Image (cartoon, rainbow, N blue to C red):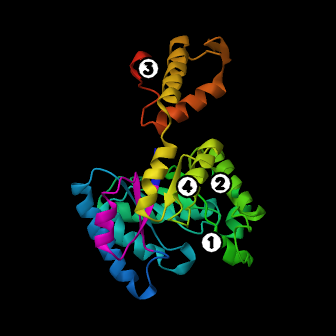
Amino acid sequence: MMRSLLFVPGDSSRKMEKAAACGADALILDLEDSVAPSRKAEARQIVRDFLIGAKRLYPAPKLIVRVNALDTGLTSDDIAAVVEGRPDAVLLPKAGSGADIQDLGTRLAVEEASAGLTEGSVLIHALMTETAGGMLAAGSFAAKSDRLAALSWGAEDLAAEIGASSNKDDNGRYTDVFRLARSLTLLASAHAGVEAIDTVFTDFRDMEALDSECRAAVRDGFSGKMAIHPAQVPVINSAFTPPPADVERAVRILALFAAAGPDAGVLSLDGKMIDKPHLRQAERVARRAGLDPAALPDPDSFKSS
């Protein structure tokens, strides 16, 4: 489970090295918006070299490469340059439908074969609300590729596409179209059985507002949040780490269902009914805590103090 995913410009090895030590669960090495057209080729080489070196130096964080969108004509060159470095995933911006995920998966398979990697080694994350088409095709992202691991949403590109002067109102709240984009991401992620990642919070100096937005994201079902500045990472990690009491309860629920066997229906915990929806929620809490729901230790070891 990735709580924090930090964007880092792909044309700066110094920034990538610094970001690797900031505590983020994943780095998004960016070949798209943060890299000028004249530096794309150089950035590919910098990211490739960093991937190869970082796999030795940093067992964590996860390393994700945001490539350029499929309609730019740059995607294949991006993939060819970085797959050899074995990124954990590729982030596709402006994903228009499940067909785009299939297209990207095919391109990745070709490069994996060339690099001697097992097919499917590189996963796919997708930004699915940066275009009107992506939003309208939200349901199509399911069952198109086993590589798909996460869906996320973005507001800036969508605002430009639809002609909105801002994505927020005078009170700093997302307007209706952008709240719809957020909701569709949650629904499409659940439909596809993948993680839902919340969008960036652009005011990197306002930690109180960031914390509030993170906790709303946790409440609604997002599993993590993207960041644009290292200072945001501790706030995001804290918000997306479940409290010990929640972890203890989740482990107890998992233990009860494990003991009851595969045909378990309604059970009782602390005098209250629990059923399969409680089990699914407990599994999510366990994963957010870095635990494997299928291989948990004795529940007593998670007693909260």
Q: Which mark is on residue 208? A: 4
**Of discs 3 and 2, which sits in the foreground?**
3
Q: Earlier in the sequence, mark 4 or mark 1?
A: 1
**Of discs 3 and 4, which sits in the foreground?**
4
Q: Is residue 8 magenta?
A: yes
Residue projecting furthest to the bottom? 38
**Of discs 1 and 2, which sits in the foreground?**
1
Could you give the CA–CA distance between mark 1 and mark 2, rounded to whole angstroms? Answer: 15 Å
Under circle 4, the secondary element is helix
Under circle 2, the secondary element is helix
Could you give the CA–CA distance between mark 3 and mark 2, rounded to whole angstroms? Answer: 35 Å
Residue bearing mark 2: 185
**Of discs 4 and 1, which sits in the foreground?**
4
Report whether residue 147 is seen: yes
Under circle 1, the secondary element is helix
**Of discs 2 and 4, which sits in the foreground?**
4
Q: Nearer the viewer, residue 6 or 296?
A: 6
Classify 10 Å Cα crowding around label 1: few (below 14), some (14-19), many (20 and above): some
Residue projecting furthest to the right? 176
Asked if marks 1 and 2 touch (Cβ < 8 Å), the reply is: no
Q: Is residue 124 magenta?
A: no
What residue appears at the point 74 percent right and 79 percent down from the top-left corner? 163
Could you give the CA–CA distance between mark 1 and mark 3, rounded to whole angstroms? Answer: 44 Å
Q: Is residue 82 above or below residue 301?
A: below
Q: Position of residue 39 (x, y in %)?
A: 38, 84
Residue span colored magenta:
5-31
What residue appears at the point 52 percent right and 34 percent down from the top-left corner? 285
Residue bearing mark 1: 156
